[in-house]
Structure formats: C-alpha cells, structure tokens
Amino acid sequence: MTPSTTLPTPAPDATSTRTVDTAQRAQIISEALPYLRRWRGQTVVIKYGGAAMTEDALKAAVMGDVALLHYVGVKVVVVHGGGNEISQMCRQLGIEPKFVDGMRVTDPETMRVTEMVMGQIGKNIAQLLGDKGAPAVGLSGKDGALLRARKFKDESSEADWGLVGEVEKVEAGLLHTLAQQGFVPVVTPVAPGHDGETYNVNADTAAGAIAVALGAAKLLLLTDVAGIFRDFSDKSSLIDALEARQAETLIADGAVSKGMIPKVRCCMEAVRGGVGRAHIVDGRTPHAILTELFTDTGCGTMITRDQ
Ligand code: ADP
Ligand code: MG
C-alpha cells in the first residue's frame, strides 16, 4: 500500500471520548484479532448514503471505519448515493423530483444535474478518505469502462423511468488496479449505455453488481432504517436474517416497498451471484460498519443464499 506510507501520520484524535481505561482498550483491540484474520485480504463493498453521508459526526465515523478497514488489509470499495442532494439541486433549478417504486424518474435535464451533483459527492468522499490516511479515487461508470448500462424496464409495470439504467456489465479491472496500488475506489453510479446516453443507476443496484463482479465477501448497504421490517408500520417486526427466496416473497407480498425494493433485489442478486453475505444496516448508528464486521451479533438485516 505505497500511497498510505507517504502520508503524514496524524496524532490520535484528541477530541474522541475516552470512555474506557487503557487495559480495557487493549482488551477490546485484542478481541478484534479473529475478525482481522477473517477479513484481511477480502473485498467488502459498501453502499454509502442517507444520514451517514449528510450528518458530520456520522460521516466522520464512516470515513474512519473505511480507513480502518483499508489499513487492516480489507479491500474496500465505496459506492455512494446522493438522492437528497440531487433532489435539492433539482428544486433549486425548478425541476420537481418524481419517483416511481423508489426510483427517480430521470429526464435528460435531471440526468445532467445527477451526473454533476453525484460526481462532486464522489470526489468529496475521496478527499475525506484521503484526510483519514486512506488515499481514495472517485470514479464513475464511465472511467476505465467500469460500468455499462441499459435502460431499466420493469416487466411487471408500465412505468418509464427515462434515463434510469440497470447495470449490464461491470469491468472490474480498474478497481483491481486501484486496490493493488493502495487506493480505495469511490464509485459514482452513473454509467454509459450503448446508445451514447448516460444513465442514472440506483446506487444499491450498482453496489450489488460490483460486489458480484469482485467476488466480494460482503455487501453492506447503509440506509436510514434499522433494516428490513416484516411490516414497516410495526417497529417490533425487524428481520434479523433471511434467505434470498424469503426476501423475494417480501417484495411479492408488498411488505417491502419504495426504496427498499432495489435494496432487497440487489442483495438477493448479490448472494445468488456468489457474494458471501449482504446486509442492510442502519447508517444512523455510529460505526455501523465496524459493528457489522467486528462483532458476532452484527446489526441490521442479513440476506443469505438459499439453503
Ligand atoms: P436510501 O436513501 O438509503 O437508498 P430509500 O429511501 O431509497 O433509502 O429506501 C429506504 C426506505 O424504504 C425506508 O425509508 C422506508 O420508507 C422504505 N421501506 C419500504 N418498505 C420497507 C420495509 N419493509 N422495511 C424497511 N423499509 C422499508
Ligand atoms: Mg434508495
């Protein structure tokens, strides 16, 4: 990891709350050993979005978690969202955002705003990771032929989402090169089609396809809910773990709707495509990433392969 070593090492964060004494701290770090052994050298794809991307304290915690994973030898790939930022910019420009089944209806003007806003978000994340000592590179599906998209169509619906794309192909070469050279790739889910168009790809879907192409051990989707609820109006119905076909049933039954549909679909496709596990985790909880990777209980909802 050559680039990391060229950066100055910052002093430990003097502002962090010291809640444990030194002996406890040493004990906690030593308990991380089995997890460090398990994850070293593995690929983890993280879909980053929601409150974890907009609230400063949460953002700093995520950047620290990603940098930590990078330093302990995990190959992390970040795929970011930015729906709220796109909506905000659209409104400023007098375009009213419109969604069908959790996906933004994207006309050519909205697509231009999307590419601009999303590109900037990706570069800012790369900068923040660099500040934490994990040099990162922001790239979109257009760079290194990373993603190829085609127009998204839902067979069961008459809806037309315009320039919303689905991933047709992932060319992971550039991601491997970046990881080998010690850089964390930060992917902006915008992708070219065969028709010269630029498509807006749902970030969850892009993260899932990239996780499959990389043979990732884990796919983590950070969101603003605790996980998948059997009944979204009943907060005691949070699902701890389920198999892909059970997840499919939740969509068919209508228990899962709106933005949770692409999340659940991409988790199912990821585990069926060889990804070890897919998790929908609460990005409003500080250090949700470390909780998922470095504890046995984990957090959120885990989707596993059909048994
Ligand atoms: P993100 O910005 O993280 O992609 P989305 O808003 O696209 O989040 O998707 C998450 C939303 O899905 C939740 O806020 C919730 O409104 C909705 N949702 C629908 N059904 C469920 C369910 N069964 N369990 C959890 N969330 C659900
Ligand atoms: Mg969403």
Image: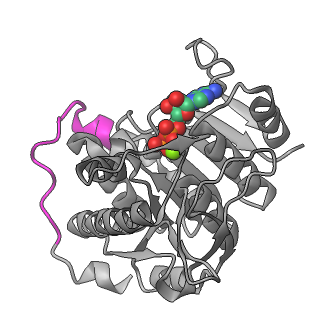
Q: Is residue 127 above or below residue 257?
A: below
The percent coordinates of residue 64 (x first, y second) are 30, 54
The percent coordinates of residue 174 (x first, y second) are 52, 85
Give the left or right position of residue 28, taking residue 276 as reference.
Answer: left
Asked if the magenta segment contains residue 271, the reply would be no
Q: What is the chief secondary structure element of the magenta stretch? A: loop
Q: Quadrant of the C terminus?
A: top right
Give the left or right position of residue 222, taking residue 20 as reference.
Answer: right
Q: Quadrant of residue 233?
A: top right
Residue in the foreground of this view, choosing between 9 and 48: 48
Residue that appears at 67% across and 30% down: 256
The percent coordinates of residue 262 (x first, y second) are 64, 46
On the question of residue 237 being in view, the answer is yes
The percent coordinates of residue 215 (x first, y second) are 69, 68
- The quadrant of the rendered image in which ligand 1 is seen is top right
Residue that appears at 20% across and 78% down: 7
On the question of residue 228 being in view, the answer is no
Asked if the magenta segment contains residue 24, the reply would be yes
Residue in the foreground of this view, choosing between 124 and 211: 124
Give the left or right position of residue 13, taking residue 167 as reference.
Answer: left
Tell which residue pokes out farthest to the right in this image: 307
In magenta, the rendered stretch is 9-26
